[in-house]
Amino acid sequence: MIKSMTGFGKGEAKSKSGVFTVELRTVNHRYFDLSSKIPNSFMLLEDRIKELLNKDIKRGKANLFLSHRSLEKESASITFDKKTIDKYRKILSEIKKRAGITEEIKLSHILSFTDVIVHEQKSLDINAVWVSVKEAVVKAAAECNKMRETEGKALYKDFSVRMTKISIYVDDISGLAPLVVEEYKRKLDARIKDIVKNNIIDNARLETELALFAKQCDISEEITRIKSHLEGFKKAIAIGEEAGRKLDFILQELNREINTLGAKANDIKISRIVINIKSELEKMREQAQNVE
């Protein structure tokens, strides 16, 4: 069964390292593309997360947010960087002198530089942390995929309804095709009578008219290919696996065959049916943009 590329999932895991929470949002995109927001201390896990997600999400733009909350009250010590303070004080003193400022350098001036205060995090075993992060990612991905599968079922039903409509329209065209041939033949007979009047036969013109007749009125090949593409579409949405690109290609081919059929038939009734089919195809192409 096909899956949508739109979904949301949230996962949480607890361990001695703290509580890890992962939020995952996915939207449609031509390829798999991950954008992640991860605390700096866990950036080494980004590639592992991407590889893990790519097992379940083959196509789509994924946005992942990882947050961490320590269970310990004193998880980090706070200190200040003496060398950095001296450096900034020297710079501020030089600025005062050059600008002719008499104001004293205050504590607030020094503290305005964010790297003066240092938060010393306790060292973490990245492999041990990965166990918890992986659990949270798996939970978020599972919930997200559940939503994608639910929307995929809705897309499947919509495609099925529209394909049934198109199949009925194609059957209607098949029924009208012989009438088109008869009408064209009637017109051709009138032309032949005009050609052979006074018992003078223009063989070259007659052959030209016959060739034109055969080319213009025969739409059987287009009807056969349209039915074949519809069967291919049905199989693709039933199998599911990364069907999006294939569906888009089939819909392009269907649209091309329908345009050719409408041009060759040159019949007002068939033209109206062709318009209805193209309307359904356009709606299907819009929906197909969100299929994985």
Image (tube, rainbow, N blue to C red):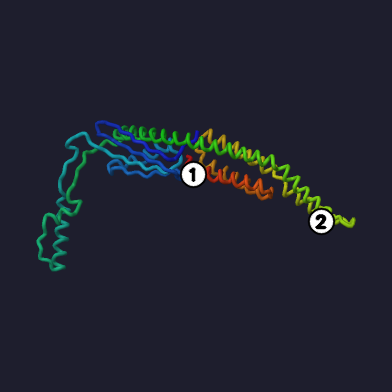
Placement of 14 over or under 118, stated as above or below: above
- Relative depth, front residue between 80 and 59: 59
Label 1: element kind: loop
Residue at x-position 54% and y-position 46%: 282
The type of residue carrying mark 2 is Arg
Residue at x-position 90% and y-position 55%: 199
Number of residue marks: 2
Mark on residue 205? 2
Label 2: element kind: helix
Placement of 21 over or under 266, stated as above or below: above
Give the quadrant of residue 47. top left
Give the quadrant of residue 11. top left
Where residue 214 sits: x, y (%)? 75, 48
Mark on residue 94? none
Residue at x-position 83% and y-position 56%: 194
In the current view of this chain or complex, which residue is farthest to the right?
A: 199
- Relative depth, front residue between 177 and 70: 177
Where residue 137 sits: x, y (%)? 35, 35
Dot 2 surroundings within 10 Å: few (below 14), some, or many (20 or more)?
A: few
Q: Mark 1 points at which residue?
A: 289
Dot 1 surroundings within 10 Å: few (below 14), some, or many (20 or more)?
A: some
Rounded to the nearest angstrom, the CA distance separating label 1 from label 2 is: 50 Å
Where residue 135 sits: x, y (%)? 33, 32
Residue at x-position 65% and y-position 38%: 171
Q: Say if mark 1 contacts mark 2, CB within 8 Å.
A: no
The type of residue carrying mark 1 is Gln
Give the quadrant of residue 17. top left
Closer mark to the observer between disc 1 and disc 2: 2
Where residue 101 sits: x, y (%)? 12, 66
- Of the numbered discs 1 and 2, the one sitting upstream in the chain is 2
